[in-house]
Image (cartoon, rainbow, N blue to C red):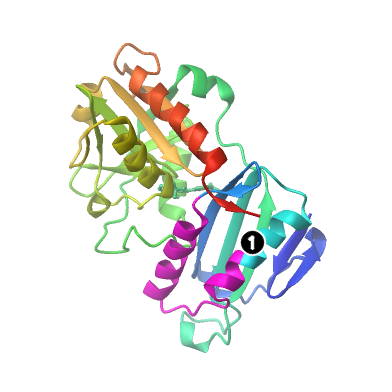
Amino acid sequence: MKIYLDGKFVDEADAKVSVFDHGLLYGDGVFEGIRLYGGNIFRLEEHLERLEDSAKALLLSMPLSRKELRDVICEACRQNNLTDGYIRLVITRGVGDLGLAPWLCAKPSIFIIASKISLYPQEHYDNGLAIVTVPTRRISPAALPPTIKPLNYLNNILAKIEAKQFGALEAIMLNDQGHIAECTADNIFTVHKGVLRTPATSQGALKGITRGTIFDIAAELGIPIRETDMTRYDVWVADECFLTGSGAEVIPVTKLDGRVIGDGRPGPITRKILASFRRRVLVEGTRI
Ligand code: PXG
């Protein structure tokens, strides 16, 4: 595998960053996880916009312009003969002294891995996923804006560990108020009496690119959709539930904390949305 690293394509074995990189020392940096379907990069501009905004929020200067980023991402796919897969784009604060001070880091580093990802086994797309609510709360938006996609994922990793300890592959994370924020790497939606619901980003949800796609699909299919405060009660009484993410795509949820959601099968609206999503990813996007 060829990795793009700070201006060059290098072999996987040579793709190394310094132990003094603040991305490693402090999680100081930002990333994107982007999907490639049939040679089309799904919603690349939206990913790049979120990346640029995340970097701006951290006063991290972008090492490449939008056009350069676009070109080098496409090149990373071509270099690896990839037409379907997953692109991980990472920008770190770069090499600095020990000590937090980001302004002592001379220049940011950038690397791009164009590879594969498979988050959940196929059976869960067919039959639904059983998820749990974990005790670990989502970091308050007052502490860290959830719209930033930072390299430090410890909050989510703690929740993921708890999910595994409860025998689940994904977990609902509540915010400080006990409202649903999102899952460890996915946004969450319910369907209740024909209406789609999802927590607002102000509740601690990342403004997911896949989440945004669901709003477009809902408009296309004429399904009402609301951003609203949600608690576990809303999932208990929901007819359907599903998660969205660049890794997970659209995956039905049929159980929460051992309780069956709806009739325990992926629901008709979820299946319609999933089908529309599958169609869109093949036609939308930037040709590599
Ligand atoms: N919330 C969080 C906390 C995430 O990390 C999403 C929601 C969904 O956002 P998108 O834009 O992907 O629809 C994410 C995305 C990985 C991986 O390598 C993680 C994500 C996406 C792709 C791969 O674990 N997280």
- Nearer-the-camera pick, 97 or 140: 140
Q: Position of residue 265 (x, y in %)?
A: 39, 14
Q: Position of residue 227 (x, y in %)?
A: 22, 43
Residue 116: image quadrant is: top right
- Nearer-the-camera pick, 166 or 111: 111
Q: Going 60% across and 56% down the picture, which residue do you hit?
A: 88
Which image quarter holds the C terminus? bottom right
Say left or right for 205 vs 168: left
Residue 163: image quadrant is: top left
Say left or right for 71 vs 166: right
Q: Going 20% across and 38% down the picture, which residue do you hit?
A: 230
* Residue located beneath label 1 in the image: 73
- Nearer-the-camera pick, 105 or 57: 57
Crowd band around label 1 with a 10 angstrom C-alpha radius: few (<14), some (14–19), many (20+): many
Majority secondary structure of the magenta segment?
Answer: helix
**Total marks drawn?**
1
Q: Position of residue 127 (x, y in %)?
A: 47, 17
Considering the numbered disc 1 on the image, is that residue within a helix, a strand or a loop?
A: helix
| Residue 125 in view of the camera | yes
The amino acid pointed to by label 1 is: Ile
Q: Which residues are magenta?
A: 43-70
Disc 1 CB within 8 Å of nearest ligand 1 atom? no
Q: Going 52% across and 77% down the picture, which residue do you hit?
A: 62
Q: Position of residue 18 (x, y in %)?
A: 68, 74
- Nearer-the-camera pick, 148 or 76: 76
